[in-house]
Amino acid sequence: MSRRSDEELLQDILQCADRIKLYISQIQYEEFVGDYKTQDAVIRNLEIIGEAVKLVSEDTKRSYPAVPWREIAGTRDKLIHDYFGVNIDVVWSIAKTDLPPLIEELRKPR
């Protein structure tokens, strides 16, 4: 299996971020807390984002200095390795607060 290019990885990140945005666009926090399917979908896409981030080259990461690459990868590790301890409040906050600036930053022309 060939390695995905950085451009493909960035597109993967954006696609997952856009999916999360769509999943939570019509619900409030109170609904999210009780909606396990949406929680699972958001968490899974955050995991994919984190995995893609780990594969992006250092050169590409340097061209996006405003992106918190390590924090994103760390979030993925926490979600994967501590699944039953996932804090839904944190997941919601990432989805609502952290993803919009990530999307904006990755869509800026380089």
Image: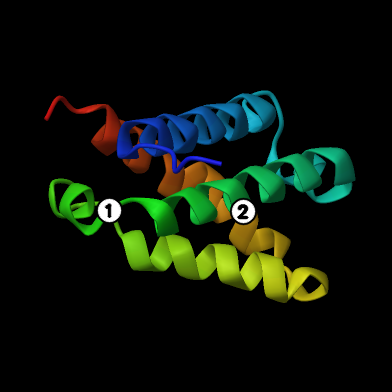
**What residue sits 33% from the left and 60% below the top?**
69
Amino acid found under the numbered disc labelled 2: Glu
Q: Pointer 2: what residue?
A: 47
Q: Residues within 10 Å of mark 1 (few under 14, many from 20)?
A: few
In percent of width and height, residue 38 lies at 79, 38
Question: Label 1 sits on what residue type?
Answer: Ser
Q: Relative to 110, does residue 36 appear above or below in the rendering?
A: below
Query: How is this picture coloured?
Result: rainbow
- Badge 1 marks a residue whose secondary structure is loop
Count of picture labels: 2
Q: What residue is pinned by disc 1?
A: 57
Residue at (48% x, 33% y) in the render: 12
* Residue 27 falls in image quadrant: top right
Residue 35 visible? The answer is no
Nearer mark to the viewer, of 1 and 2: 1
Q: Which percent across, then down, holds residue 67?
A: 27, 52
Can residue 57 be seen here? The reply is: yes
On residue 72, the disc is none
